[in-house]
Amino acid sequence: MTIPRVSWYVLAMGAVLLFMARMPGMMTLMLAVPMLIWSVRGLLRRPRLHPMAVYMLASLLAAVAWGGQYCRSWSIGQDASVVAQAVVQYHDRTGHYPAQLEGIGYNTQQARFRLGLYYRLDEGGRPALMYQSPWTVFETNHYDFAQKSWHFVGD
């Protein structure tokens, strides 16, 4: 009752790619699922382990990956809300919005890399604050400074 060595390698590569990716939701669809299918197919061709155990292992890995991604998504949303509140408080204190995030004590490069957060002022001095959805690169969340709320913008 052993899993073939190649299947372990494929599962390990899929897990590493999934947990190290910046957008694991998208990586799941693009890389981990085909690897998992290939691995399960290999196991079913030479069954040394009960197929139900393979499905249970695959389900467990998927649940852990998606659960971790959900926690990351929630955390990014919370951090982005803190930045939005800091921008609003700066506006309330000074009467204008900061030109860059450095004006409120945030490093623009770190916010962009860690959160996928983008901030800028347009020609009229109106701010635009948004971050990429952690699930895919095609969806974003925009902050509406008039309503003081986040709005999801889908693909």
Image: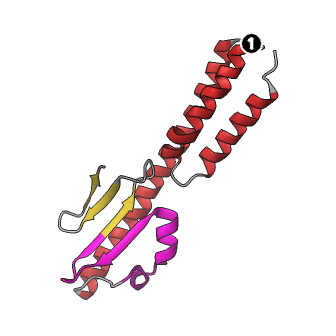
Q: What x and y, as percent, mark residue 71?
A: 50, 47
In what quadrant of the picture does the N terminus appear?
Answer: top right
In the rendered image of this protein, does residue 56 appear above or below residue 101?
above
At 69% from the left and 34% from the top, the residue drawn is 11
At 75% from the left and 14% from the top, the residue drawn is 46
Q: What x and y, as percent, mark residue 19?
A: 62, 47
Answer whether residue 111 is magenta in the image: yes
Q: What x and y, as percent, mark residue 76?
A: 45, 57
In the rendered image of this protein, does residue 59 appear above or below residue 107?
above
At 32% from the left and 57% from the top, the residue drawn is 141
Q: Amino acid at mark 1?
A: Pro
Q: Is residue 96 left or right of residue 61?
A: left
Magenta residue span: 100-128
Q: Which residue is mark 1?
A: 47
Q: Is residue 43 left or right of residue 113?
A: right
- Determine which quarter of the picture holds residue 50: top right
